[in-house]
Image (tube, rainbow, N blue to C red):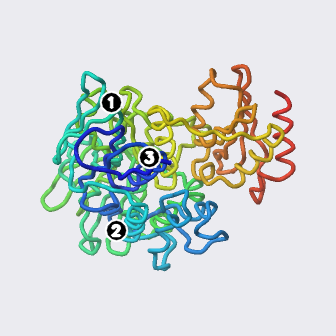
């Protein structure tokens, strides 16, 4: 491994990373481990990214257990710590739980920032702070140039770890007259007021949960119903269920399935017109406050003009399985913008790339792909083909990547025993020209059931088999190894 100084002054680099949030830190760590010449620049004055500002009421949804069945320095501990960044060196693991006061299993944003700052410091990640990216262009020689407040950076590839942090409002007449989630006041200032929250996703219910002790009444509305049976198995349930319970027992909160048609200011109050969706009909509200919890978009600046295609109403870049722009080669993304790579979405289940728990593993995929393109091929290990069932069973039972990114990341091996390691499942499935191989992943069904799946590719044909679930998730046991051996023997 080549140790680099992580220089950040303007000039020529193989790769430039933009951003010092968890996505940028994680990517920079892996680039350094792989010996890739790079610089890291950030408009912020310190690491932490969006967690320096949000969540608005200060406590996250994702959890970390300071004590767990595995040592904090082990890879298995990553199952129990969804907020720390990951590393090969045990000394660089589990920094967020070390910062937590243990009053809750979910950290505050200050604890989150402290953990990530400790990672940046102890991993020796050199970052040029106070350096804002302002414009982008492509030179005739194909290199990308970033124009910044600190000078120009030329590179062969850019990794934008800029988050999905720019407030976005849905196109509702009058919505520009009300504050966005990002502009929410102190919770106590809503005391005794009737508050209407537009949006029933994470940020909407975060507001409802935080305002429940203060507001006289809360109304949370969006067209689609909340699927409580899915939320019950999700880490976000801690925010959703208290407002939902209040709504269902008649405590004053209303969680409505309604499409907002207009927002009108009437004196000191707001009038909202809506149409019910699950129960059709016009609904009229008069409230003291309205908050638009309608989401965010990635601050792409001039990248769309450069050709970067977007999805989700223009809010997120459209990405390949390796988190590269589908339309502009050399432009990659890290952090929660990596949700722009959709994956297979079997049973409608999406990746966890919007959260640290998932995108920390995406960063290694990006770094490895860049290293290979820049002439640093991966060292692929080999295993006796007869030991493949044991290797794959161990990956199913023990790999944090597969458990964090269910149905999105897979452990792949060629049938002659060459270990590919963790790869995007979509790439394995959609690469018929690759060598014959097998990939295993952990998946969810629509009811939240967890089970292993096996994908076997031979002679450009793909066979998919879901194995039985196990009450203890012991997917490395003898029955699973026997079935893996049968599947591999069949090809």
The residue singled out by tag 1 in the image is 308
Q: Is residue 163 above or below residue 376?
A: below
* Secondary structure found at label 2: loop
For residue 187, the mark is none
N-term-proximal mark, 2 vs 3: 3
Q: Cα distance, mark 1 to mark 3?
A: 23 Å
Give the class, few, some or many, for how many residues have Cα within 10 Å of label 2's Cα (few <14, many ≥20).
some
The residue singled out by tag 3 in the image is 31
Task: Please tell me which residue is depicted at 81% across the width and 43% down the height of the picture.
Answer: 387
Q: Nearer the viewer, residue 187 or 323?
A: 323
Question: Which label lies toward us, 1 or 2?
Answer: 1
Question: Where residue 396 sits: x, y (%)?
Answer: 71, 49
The residue singled out by tag 2 in the image is 57
Q: Cα distance, mark 2 to mark 3?
A: 34 Å
Question: Where residue 431 sits: x, y (%)?
Answer: 60, 25
159 sits left or right of 145 in the view: right
Give the class, few, some or many, for how many residues have Cα within 10 Å of label 1's Cα (few <14, many ≥20).
some
* Secondary structure found at label 1: loop
Q: Is residue 135 above or below residue 49?
A: above
Task: Please tell me which residue is depicted at 75% across the width and 40% down the height of the picture.
Answer: 466
Q: Nearer the viewer, residue 283 or 307?
A: 307
N-term-proximal mark, 1 vs 2: 2
276 sits left or right of 193 in the view: right
* Secondary structure found at label 3: helix
Q: Is residue 190 above or below residue 425?
A: below
* The furthest residue to the left: 267
Q: Nearer the viewer, residue 469 or 334?
A: 334
N-term-proximal mark, 1 vs 3: 3
Task: Please tell me which residue is depicted at 21% across the width and 55% down the height of the picture.
Answer: 130
């Amino acid at each position: 491994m080549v140790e680099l100084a992580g220089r950040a002054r303007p000039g020529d680099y193989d790769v430039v990373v933009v951003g010092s949030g968890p996505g940028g830190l994680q990517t920079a760590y892996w680039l350094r481990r792989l010996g890739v010449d790079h610089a890291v620049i950030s408009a912020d004055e310190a690491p932490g990214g969006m967690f320096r500002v949000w969540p608005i009421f200060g406590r996250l949804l994702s959890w970390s257990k300071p004590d767990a069945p595995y040592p904090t320095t082990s890879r298995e501990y990553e199952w129990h710590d969804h907020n720390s960044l990951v590393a090969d060196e045990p000394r660089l693991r589990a920094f967020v739980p070390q910062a937590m006061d243990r009053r809750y299993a979910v950290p505050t944003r200050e604890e989150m920032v402290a953990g990530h700052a400790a990672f940046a410091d102890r991993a020796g990640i050199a970052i040029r702070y106070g350096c804002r990216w302002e414009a982008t262009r492509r030179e005739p020689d194909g290199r990308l140039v970033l124009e910044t407040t600190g000078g120009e950076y030329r590179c062969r590839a850019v990794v934008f770890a800029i988050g999905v942090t720019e407030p976005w409002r849905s196109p509702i007449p009058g919505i520009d007259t009300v504050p966005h989630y990002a502009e929410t006041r102190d919770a106590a200032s809503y005391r005794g007021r009737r508050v209407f929250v537009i949006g029933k996703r994470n940020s909407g219910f975060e507001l409802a949960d935080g305002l429940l002790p203060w507001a006289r009444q809360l109304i949370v509305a969006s067209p689609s119903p909340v699927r409580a049976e899915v939320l019950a198995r999700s880490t976000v349930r801690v925010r959703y269920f208290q407002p939902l319970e209040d709504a269902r027992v008649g405590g004053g909160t209303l969680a409505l399935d309604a499409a907002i048609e207009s927002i009108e200011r009437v004196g000191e109050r707001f009038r909202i017109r809506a149409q019910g969706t699950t129960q059709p009909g016009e609904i009229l509200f008069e409230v003291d406050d309205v908050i638009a919890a309608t989401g965010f978009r990635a601050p792409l600046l001039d990248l769309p003009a450069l050709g970067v295609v977007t999805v989700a109403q223009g809010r997120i870049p459209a990405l390949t399985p390796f988190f590269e722009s589908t339309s502009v080669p050399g432009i990659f993304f890290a952090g929660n913008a990596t949700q722009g790579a959709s994956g297979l979405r079997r049973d409608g289940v999406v990746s966890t790339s919007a959260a640290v728990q998932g995108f920390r593993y995406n960063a290694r995929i990006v770094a490895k792909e860049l290293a290979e393109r820049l002439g640093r091929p991966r060292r692929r290990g080999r295993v006796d083909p007869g030991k493949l069932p044991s290797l794959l069973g161990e990956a199913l039972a023990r790999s944090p990547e597969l458990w964090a990114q269910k149905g999105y990341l897979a452990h792949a091996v060629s049938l002659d025993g060459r270990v590919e390691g963790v790869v995007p499942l979509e790439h394995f499935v959609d690469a018929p020209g690759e060598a014959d191989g097998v990939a295993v992943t952990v998946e969810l069904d629509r009811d939240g059931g967890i089970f292993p799946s096996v994908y076997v590719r031979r002679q450009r044909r793909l066979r998919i088999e879901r194995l039985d679930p196990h009450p203890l998730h012991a997917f490395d046991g003898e029955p699973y190894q026997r079935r893996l051996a049968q599947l591999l023997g069949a090809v």
